[in-house]
Amino acid sequence: MAVSREDVEYVARLARIELTEDEKNTLTSQLCSILGHIEKLNELDTEGIEPTFHVLEVANVFREDEVRPSLSAEEVLKNAPARDDGFFKVPKIIE
């Protein structure tokens, strides 16, 4: 799979990054090289090999939910730089 200069420009535009002409040329060449190496993986015979999601066997460790004491509202808010009526007060971010 070849990567064109237009592909690099398109991805740069999506990422909102500005590239110089030299960077566009370099990235086009590098991405073509990377994809060339990845294409070699398609040459491997994977017949009969089960897909794996992780190289090691992984199992979730679950614990029982249990009710435990928590901090009081006053203790939680004692280090808050600003509070209002028992809540954290934060700057308004939506106009």
Image (spheres, helix red, strand yellow):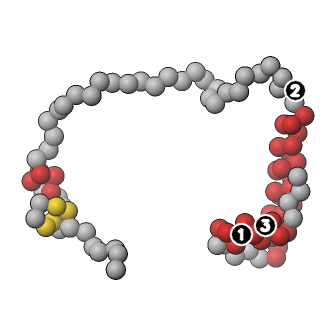
User: Who comes first in sequence, dot 1 or dot 2?
Assistant: 1
Give the x, y percent position of residue 4. 87, 64
Query: Would you say 69 lies left or right of 65 here?
Result: left
**Residue at 85% in and 68% down:** 5
- Which of 84/27 is in front? 84
Q: Are marks 1 and 3 in contact (CB under 8 Å)?
A: yes
Distance in Å between CA atoms under marks 1 and 2: 35 Å
Res 19 seen here? yes
Question: Camera-side residue: 21 or 53?
Answer: 53
Q: Toward which corner of the image does residue 66 lie, by quadrant? A: top left
Element class at badge 2: loop
* CA neighbours of label 3 inside 10 A, class few (<14), some (14 to 19), many (20+): some
Q: Quadrant of the C terminus?
A: bottom left
Q: Decide: marks 1, 2 in contact (CB < 8 A)?
A: no
Q: Amino acid at mark 2?
A: Asp
The disc labelled 3 sits on which kind of residue? Val
Q: Which residue is mark 3?
A: 8
Residue at horizontal 81%, vertical 57%?
31
The reply to whether residue 23 is visible in this rendering is no
Disc sitting over residue 45 in the figure? 2
Q: Which residue is mark 1?
A: 12
**Amino acid type of the residue tagged 1 in the rendering:** Ala
Asked which secondary structure carries label 3, the reply is helix
Rendering coords of residue 3 (x, y %): 85, 60
Res 93 quadrant in image: bottom left
Left or right: residue 64 versus residue 83 is: right
